[in-house]
Amino acid sequence: MNNHSENTTPTPNAWGLTPILLFVVLVVATGLVTNDITAMPILVAFFISAGFALCLNPKDQKLSFADKIQRFCEGGGNKNIILLVLIFLLAGAFYAVTIDIGARDATVNMALQFVPSALILPGLFLICCFISFAMGTSMGTITALSPIGAGLAESLGLPVELALGIVVGGAMFGDNLSFVSDTTIAATRTQGVQLKDKFKANLIVAIPACIVTMAMLLFIDVDTSGLVEAGDYDVWRILPYFLIIAFALGGFNVITVLAVGIASACIVGLVQGSFTALSMMQSIQKGMGWMQDLAMIAITIGGIVALMHQNGGSYLAD
């Protein structure tokens, strides 16, 4: 039966699409009930959808539960899915190691020292753009720089909401262009697109928005007399960020890009005493742990898509 299902094109079947529709309903309905769109745990929602998909059958066929589980595992273990999982884990390791060596804080301090006081708001926006672009995480950038943005707002006598809006906007802008963002990696790998090609395409949309934002921030009057001087920084701690950007623009494979970033951050951390060899490995493990949920989501989605394909959901457009 298993060989027959693999060699025969499934009959188009609307029920084959219902697992992903169930996922959307679970997330949206839970968000409406709780007034929090993030209330439903994403991985749990996907597991419920996977369970529902296992209850379905192709049109005019009856598959055993063992065959369905086999198909789910084949989808989740697809070589592209496993590659995504590997990339996610490496991206988490890079994120954690660069934070632990102080790369993020050094970048902020360096930027604040070179940004003229009159351009502090556009400068804050660009700092957020660069850090999010280099680290590949908008939420991590927002978490790290929100206190800095709030502090600047208090020093300048501006609404805190304005500064936080600048932080969020810059973080989203940088993450959208980042070479090591999980969403960028997933999009390029699943569509067979080179990282630099997506980067070039995104620039067409992102650059005009960035220019308009910078221009609007320039028209905001600020009193910079209360600004506190930025702290000292070590340019070597920022080196991993520049390396991954350079290697990515050079067209290197994303695995190579992340490996260079992690290796350079580890070397800088060891040389400068930011951590020992053991704590360095613990930092790598910590970062990989941050990405475990995302890795499991990718595997589960792969399994669900395989079941949807087997049940004829992907043939409705033919």
Image (cartoon, rainbow, N blue to C red):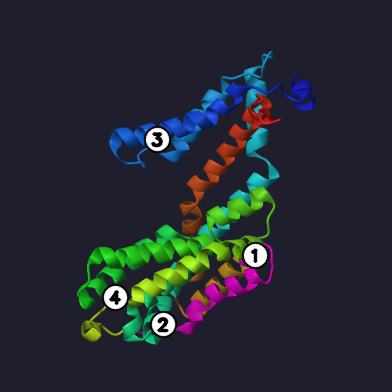
- For residue 64, the mark is none
**Is any atom of residue 135 visible in this view?**
no
Marks 3/4 in contact by CB < 8 Å: the verdict is no
Q: Residue at x 62, y 65 (%)?
A: 200
Residue 93 appears at what percent x and percent y? 52, 61
Q: Earlier in the sequence, mark 2 or mark 3?
A: 3
Question: Where is residue 170, by image quadrant?
Answer: bottom left
Mostly what secondary structure, the magenta segment?
helix
In-image side of 60 versus 212 (left or right): right
Judging by the rendered image, the residue that carries numbered circle 3 is 28
- Per the image, is 120 magenta? no
Quarter of the image containing the N terminus? top right
Quarter of the image containing the C terminus? top right
Q: Secondary structure at mark 3?
A: helix
Q: Residue at x 41, y 61 (%)?
A: 140
- Per the image, is 245 magenta? yes
- For residue 220, the mark is 4
Q: Earlier in the sequence, mark 1 or mark 3?
A: 3
Marks 1/3 in contact by CB < 8 Å: the verdict is no
Give the magenta range: 232-257
Judging by the rendered image, the residue that carries numbered circle 1 is 196
Q: Residue at x 66, y 65 (%)?
A: 256
Judging by the rendered image, the residue that carries numbered circle 2 is 110
Q: Residues within 10 Å of mark 1 (few under 14, many from 20)?
A: some
3D distance between C-alphas at marks 1 and 4: 35 Å
3D distance between C-alphas at marks 1 and 3: 34 Å
